[in-house]
Image: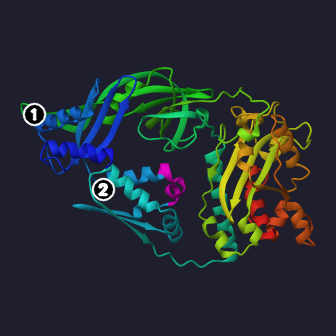
Amino acid sequence: MSKVSEFLEYINKKTCNRYDFLRLRQVFFDKKTNSCAIHLMYPSSMDLTKEQKEEITNIVKEYVKIDGKVDVNIGKSFIENDLILSFIKKFLQTNSPFVYSTMDFENVKIKIDGDVKVEIGLSASLYDYFERTNLSHQILNALQKNFYAQFDLTLVKMGEKEVVQEDVLSSRFQEMQMKSDIDGLLNRTQDKYMVTDKKVVVGSEINFNPRHISSIKQENENCVIAGQIGFITEKTFKSKRMKKNKDGTQEPMEKPYFKFQVRDDTGTIHGVIFPSVANYHKMHLITNGNIVLMQGRVSKYNDTFDITAKNISFCKIPEKHEIEQNIDQNTINDYRYVRPQKYYSQKQANLFEKISYSKEAMTGSFVVYDFETTGINTEHDEIIEIGALKIQGGEFREVFSTLVKPKRPIPPDATRVNRITNDMVANCYSIEQVIRDFYLFCKGSQMVGYNSISFDSVFLNRAGKSVGINFDNNQIDAFLLARQKLKGLKNYKLSTVAKNLEVSLIDAHRALNDVIATAGVFMKLY
């Protein structure tokens, strides 16, 4: 029997099953203060008297048996269409940004009639994605965990409108789709960095890397930041919900909220959080000066950005000046500064199902990579961007993408080619820090570049040796494959070869863009 079942059975046994409708929503224990907070919920169709709640509270305290303070909150589970839809949106935004940005939420139908019936209408490609990833089951579990109700979730494949395709329009659509995919990947990876020692304080675990505060340029986006918290102030506001007084009158309920600032080495942002009853006392664990990881939605007031936080964790931020020398590459088994991102693409879902590639291409593990640099001198110029894509089992799996801060300013000539400025790399990690994580990303895979044997691989080996890492991966140059297998082309530039093989190349001379095109070329030639 689980601890939760044992706990609820104890209450039922003590009360002759009078409260068998109770569910345990959340438990929080603070070792420092030896205090515990327990949140129980019951159906919105029922009412519990003050005496009944006191009876349950006393039984809970009897069961917990600790010397410290035990807070017991017993509240209704409110179920409304908008509340359920909002929960589904937030779940997808946090756990599957690709689906969140692609779905039409007008096709989500919710009917509450005792049980809650949720019907999600999806395009054919999204329907297949839900089926492959078991995402509907994840949503269903989350709904039943957070609401007191029985849910029935159904996926509906929407009929797709008939479209008359012309070659030019079709080509343009694919090009736009590919650009959207790459832009999304760049947005998720370029300004991100890693934190360590995460410990949840309020809300749930944050599984995304933070971005620099100075990079926040628009409102209505869900973002993750990290930094030092300060100027915490507790305030109250009058809620729209009314409370009944003993004399029968009603007045607005007062609810608490907290204002604060978060500062990293690039800027400061003001923030606010409206904690639930269960999370209220946890906010008092956070004090000025703590380093926190925070997830929330960005708003704009008077030309400044604010963040309304939902989840907060304690964390540690690696120092940018800390450079490890003589790294033992055999001990590299975790990402410290840059973490790979999953490769999500609606276009990619059926890419390898329609085309037959060689057995070697379909079964091998490859990392397609490209560098942007401050120039073409392999002895003196520096890497300022790494873009890489991992291919396993014939599928695009993960992306490693990061800007890198060089030791010297980026020359204007280099910026004209790759559009990377000194401001863009000012708050990034050095190559000595990033290269250890790139080594882990490439470990066990063959490395593929375009014209890389005489250029990218030279920069790669120099960067690795600067900290004692040896990149001994087998190197494949797709440029040489193209020259061997495509005879008679006017030249063998990536753009020319990609066009010949009908592979999209969007915005050449940014590392990740070139990598996606090189991957397509490589899979067709290998």
Give the residue pinned by disc 2. Answer: 81
Q: How many marks?
A: 2
Classify mark 2: residues with Cα within 10 Å, few (<14), some (14-19) or many (20+): some
Residue 270 in picture, x, y percent from top left:
48, 29
Q: Nearer the viewer, residue 221 or 193?
A: 193
For the magenta stretch, what is the residue range? 93-102
Give the residue pinned by disc 1. Answer: 249
Query: Is 316 left, or right, of 157 in this rendering?
Result: right
Residue occupying image coordinates x 15% and y 41%: 14
Q: Nearer the viewer, residue 72 or 291?
A: 72
The quarter of the displayed image where residue 257 is located: top left
Residue 98 magenta-drawn? yes
Query: Is 50 left, or right, of 486 in this rendering?
Result: left
Q: CA distance from mark 2 to mark 1?
A: 30 Å
Colouring scheme applied when the structure was drawn: rainbow
Residue 218 in picture, x, y percent from top left:
55, 41
Residue occupying image coordinates x 54% and y 35%: 225
Classify mark 1: residues with Cα within 10 Å, few (<14), some (14-19) or many (20+): few
Name the residue type under label 1: Thr
Query: Is 408 left, or right, of 49 in this rendering?
Result: right
Residue 430 magenta-drawn? no
The residue sitting at the front extreme is 1
Name the residue type under label 2: Asn
Residue 345 in picture, x, y percent from top left:
61, 61
Q: Earlier in the sequence, mark 2 or mark 1?
A: 2
Q: What SS does tag 1 mark?
A: loop
The quarter of the displayed image where residue 514 is located: bottom right
Asked if the residue under mark 1 is in contact with the one under mark 2, i.e. CB atoms within 8 Å, the reply is no
